[in-house]
């Protein structure tokens, strides 16, 4: 990484939040986005916790110096923070609060705790980096696989940028950010599928899609989604730049509406929680279940799951667990024959057993014949 190893200092007025920061959201990014807009977009990044720590610890930490590039922005060359935007945003909110313009009551209360440490706003430590490319590996390691990870959509956007704009292969991205090739591939495919949805599907809830990238990412990792959309997960970046083939774009439209609901909210999303993803994947493996989803105005994930045979697997698991527990109990039950509590539960078990066995006459006959 080409950088000036000397620590430098600048006031918060000389340092600019990065309008190309993936964390502000790809629909909000761009070189013309104002600093005020970016501050509004980052308001929910728990900035108050950082601000309080500055006040409690006597200022900004030198070991957390900002990483900065010198680039043209708003018509002239400026110092743009590529790494450390949350730290700078916290300083700017705190500065506004101390100067009579708090963003909220919370910031007003923070500014009333104690006076700001000397030079908090005038000597912010930073390290100058030659260009953005020099810092990409560090950003990837820190925010894609490191301890301060971005959300799934932010990771995917960053990975896609390295592949589509820098021309890196999956293996090269993997080495640069310290991830694994399959993880890089999955993030890239999910991001490209999202772009395909935006380009080809009209009637889906775009706002919900922007908020639920993790559900898309996890859904595409199921066998059912790969089959339903015909995604070649082993293709190279050029082949899977459009992961869903042209002849399966109708399926992609259905998939988008099932994930996110329709644009006018006439159809609610099937999935509202990542814990439902495995059910959804099972449904997409079944032709009967997917046909039910396609013909229904407001389909039910639970009913689709039943049609896909999902209940069968669940019931088998229940019976397996019960049988395992009975076998464990049989090894010691003879020691507690006089226990009234145990006898009560055995009677309950017996009633349930006969109800269960009568559902399967063939097995019932075989067992009674075996034990006669």
Image: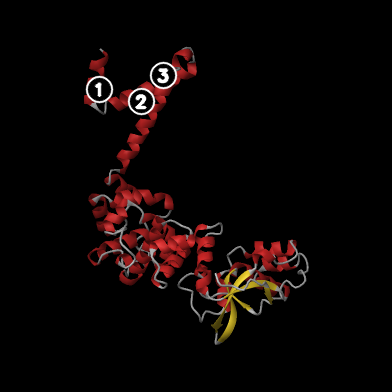
Q: Residue furthest bottom?
A: 75
Residue 208, picture quadrant = bottom left
Residue linked to disc 3: 330
Disc 3 versus disc 2: distance between alpha carbons?
17 Å
Helix, strand or loop at mark 3 = helix
Disc 1 versus disc 2: distance between alpha carbons?
14 Å
Q: Is 313 left, or right, of 58 in this rendering?
A: left
Q: Position of residue 112 (x, y in %)?
A: 76, 67
Residue 348, picture quadrant = top left
Judged by depth in the image, the label closer to the viewer, 1 or 3, is 3
Label 3 environment density (alpha carbons within 10 Å; few <14, some 14–19, many ≥20): few
Q: Are marks 3 and 2 in contact (CB under 8 Å)?
A: no
User: Number of callouts in the render?
Assistant: 3
Disc 1 versus disc 3: distance between alpha carbons?
21 Å
Report if residue 102 is visible in the image.
no
Q: Position of residue 29 (x, y in %)?
A: 49, 75
Residue linked to disc 1: 364
Nearest to N terminus: mark 1 or mark 2 = 2
Label 2 environment density (alpha carbons within 10 Å; few <14, some 14–19, many ≥20): few
Measuring 44% from the left and 13% from the top, which residue is drawn there? 334
Q: How is the image coloured?
A: secondary structure
Most foreground residue, 310 or 224 = 224
Q: Which mark is residue 352?
A: 2
Most foreground residue, 29 or 348 = 29
């Amino acid at each position: 990484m080409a950088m000036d190893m000397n620590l430098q200092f600048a006031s918060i007025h000389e340092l600019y939040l990065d309008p190309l920061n993936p964390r502000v959201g790809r629909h909000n990014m761009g070189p013309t986005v104002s600093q005020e807009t970016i501050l509004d977009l980052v308001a929910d990044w728990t900035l108050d916790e950082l601000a309080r720590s500055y006040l409690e610890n006597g200022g900004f930490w030198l070991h957390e110096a900002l990483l900065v590039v010198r680039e043209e922005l708003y018509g002239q060359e400026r110092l743009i923070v590529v790494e450390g935007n949350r730290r700078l945003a916290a300083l700017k909110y705190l500065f506004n609060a101390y100067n009579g313009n708090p963003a909220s009551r919370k910031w007003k209360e923070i500014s009333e705790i104690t006076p700001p440490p000397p030079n908090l706003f005038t000597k912010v430590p930073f390290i100058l980096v030659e260009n953005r490319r020099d810092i990409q590996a560090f950003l990837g390691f820190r925010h894609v696989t490191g301890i301060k990870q971005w959300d799934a959509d932010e990771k995917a956007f960053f990975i896609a940028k390295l592949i589509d704009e820098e021309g890196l292969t999956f293996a090269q991205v993997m080495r640069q950010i310290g991830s694994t090739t399959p993880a890089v591939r999955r993030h890239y495919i999910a991001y490209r599928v999202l772009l395909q949805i935006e380009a080809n599907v009209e009637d889906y809830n775009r706002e919900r899609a922007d908020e639920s990238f993790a559900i898309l990412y996890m859904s595409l990792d199921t066998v059912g989604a790969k089959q339903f959309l015909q995604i070649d997960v082993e293709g190279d970046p050029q082949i899977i730049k459009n992961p869903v083939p042209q002849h399966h774009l109708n399926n992609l439209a259905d998939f988008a509406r099932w994930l996110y609901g329709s644009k006018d909210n006439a159809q609610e999303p099937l999935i509202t929680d990542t814990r439902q993803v495995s059910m959804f994947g099972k449904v997409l493996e079944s032709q009967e279940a997917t046909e039910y989803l396609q013909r229904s105005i407001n389909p039910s994930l639970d009913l689709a799951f039943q049609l896909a045979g999902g209940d069968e697997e669940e019931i088998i698991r229940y019976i397996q667990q019960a049988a395992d527990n009975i076998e464990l109990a049989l090894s010691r039950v003879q020691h507690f024959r006089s226990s009234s509590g145990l006898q009560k539960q055995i009677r309950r078990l017996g009633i349930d057993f006969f109800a269960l066995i009568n559902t399967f006459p063939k097995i019932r006959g075989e067992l009674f014949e075996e034990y006669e």
